[in-house]
Amino acid sequence: MSTIIDGLSLGSIYALIALGYTMVYGIAKMLNFAHGDIIMIGAYALFTMMNLTGSPIVAIITAIVVCTLLGIVIEKVAYKPLRGASPLAVLITAIGVSYLLQSVAQIIYGAKARPVTLFSLGTVKFGEVTLSLSALVTLIVCAVIMVGLTLFVKCTKIGRAMVAVSEDKAAAQLMGVNVNNIISITFAIGSCLAAFAAVFYLLQISATSPTLGSMPGIKAFTAAVIGGIGSIPGAMIGGILLGLIEKLCQSVTALSPYTTAIEFGILILILLVKPTGLLGRKRREKV
Amino acid sequence: MSYMLETNNLGISFGGLKAVQDVNLKIEKNCLYGLIGPNGAGKTTLFNMLTGVYKPTTGSFSLDGENLTGLSQETINHKGIARTFQNIRLFNNMSVIRNVLVGLHNQPDFKCNPFVSMIHAKRHYENESNMRNRAKELLRIFDLEEERNNLACNLPYGKQRKLEIARALATNPKLLLLDEPAAGMNPQETAELMDTIRFIRDEFDLTVLLIEHDMSLVSGICDEITVLNFGTVLDHGSTRSVLANPEVIKAYLGD
């Protein structure tokens, strides 16, 4: 039982990050490989503010603001000039931004892992089972965020414009939708989710380093691909699936050394059977 | 007086190819204006310039006296030019009504602060329901209200064309550009479409510029036409006189 809750909570962190990948891909048609590093920057923002003020609330708010602004700035400075360039150029730029962020963090904070304790929540007992409270909080907050995001996309003007831009950017633009604004908003939302991911990730591992974002970044990217990249519910399902698999594998002694191999093996299997991912749509070519 | 649309020596080259050159159109307000010409004559390219998809390399154009040359697509749309596409470009996986709602996205009547939307305040719901009502009115004109919750891609072809016009109208244009609105329609549908175009011209106080190959539609509703051939204007004037011009007949049918 506690393994399942741990898995769901890790999965919902992956899902939060995967949402960032999938939304940016859906709307800007690019893979933002610097997304994982925004989590790392968020973690350092938390670390800095915790040391300066000691207040988790201030630290969390700062991290959210820093990440959101960083997402918008990266898009404006690095990706916007490449709109219309070949996807490969954008991809290389994204990798470049990723290394840039890691190096900047290393210059400022050093390569050593720094301990961060936001708050410790302890455990709760439900009859026989003991559950970690932080896992429960993660799960609940992530669920609320995901429902909120789904409603936002479904029921608001901006959300509708986002779907329209992801369907046909040029047609949306000709209908008066400001595509640049929509892309900025998408990056802002994705990076804001990354800040939340940073908070929950630090609750689990309690230390930050310049490469903190790489592994969850890659795992979440995998989750987005498993779910069908570009699909919001797909990213949620993919993330939760991956988190569950990871925790279940780790709980079985014989399997635990192969956890990562199993996760990526499943990615390969799913792509073999369904190349567009679980909820991905086939793009029909017009004749 | 100023014309609704006026172009001055408008032209564009792609590398060495002069796709369109020296086009001078003068379209009066509330006119139904036709643009005809053989395939590859540059008609759609001209539309793309008028909507900001391509930046003209020479000349300029103005809408209702205001120069719009070189502005971005969405700005030109805000200033009052909307269009449909030769190959239908609906948002296929969105419902019919949501397609129209996207067209209403930037209408000043429906401005709503994103933060208001995010906290789902009452203002947000009022705004959304106003938008839906407006969208339904537009769909009613095109007889699409019943199908508003279907996916756009599941509509039959003729209705997709109508939905494109409804979506363009949602952006509240002064000038509507229709790129082959009757393509793929049977004679009955074409006749209905002609009535609809006249109706929306009067109802929305529009000026319409349309590209069409169906001569029954062109001669049936256009007040004036311009003929493009190899990127230049072959002839222009009242529909009857232009269609009687031997040069025009030759361009279309060969010698």
Image: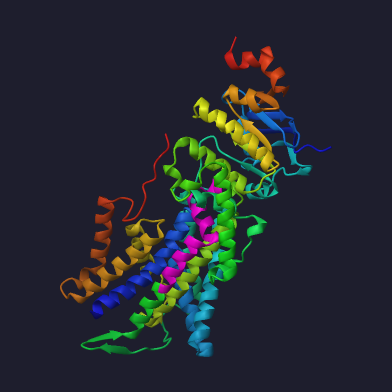
Was residue A157 drawn as part of the magenta stretch in this picture?
A: yes
In percent of width and height, residue B136 lies at: 55, 50
Task: In the displayed orientation, state which residue is furthest to the right.
Answer: B1
Q: How is the image coloured?
A: rainbow
Left or right: where B151 falls relative to A188: left
Say above or below: B176 vs B117: above
Instruction: Give the magenta part as a residue range.
Output: A144-172
Q: How many marks?
A: 0
Left or right: where B26 falls relative to A183: right
Quarter of the rendering containing residue A241 = bottom left
Q: Residue at x 39, y 64 (%)?
A: A18
In percent of width and height, residue B57 lies at: 69, 37
Q: Main secondary structure of the magenta part?
A: helix
Q: Residue at x 68, y 30 (%)?
A: B33
In percent of width and height, residue A7 lies at: 28, 74
Was residue B3 drawn as part of the magenta stretch in this picture?
A: no
Does residue B225 appear anywhere in the picture?
yes
Say above or below: B77 vs B162: below
Q: Quadrant of the C terminus of chain A?
A: top left
Say above or below: B141 vs B236: below
Q: Residue at x 69, y 25 (%)?
A: B226
Task: In the displayed orientation, state which residue is furthest to the top.
Answer: B255
Say above or below: B108 vs A214: above
In percent of width and height, residue B40 lies at: 57, 26
Q: Quadrant of the N terminus of chain A?
A: bottom left
Does residue B13 appear anywhere in the picture?
no
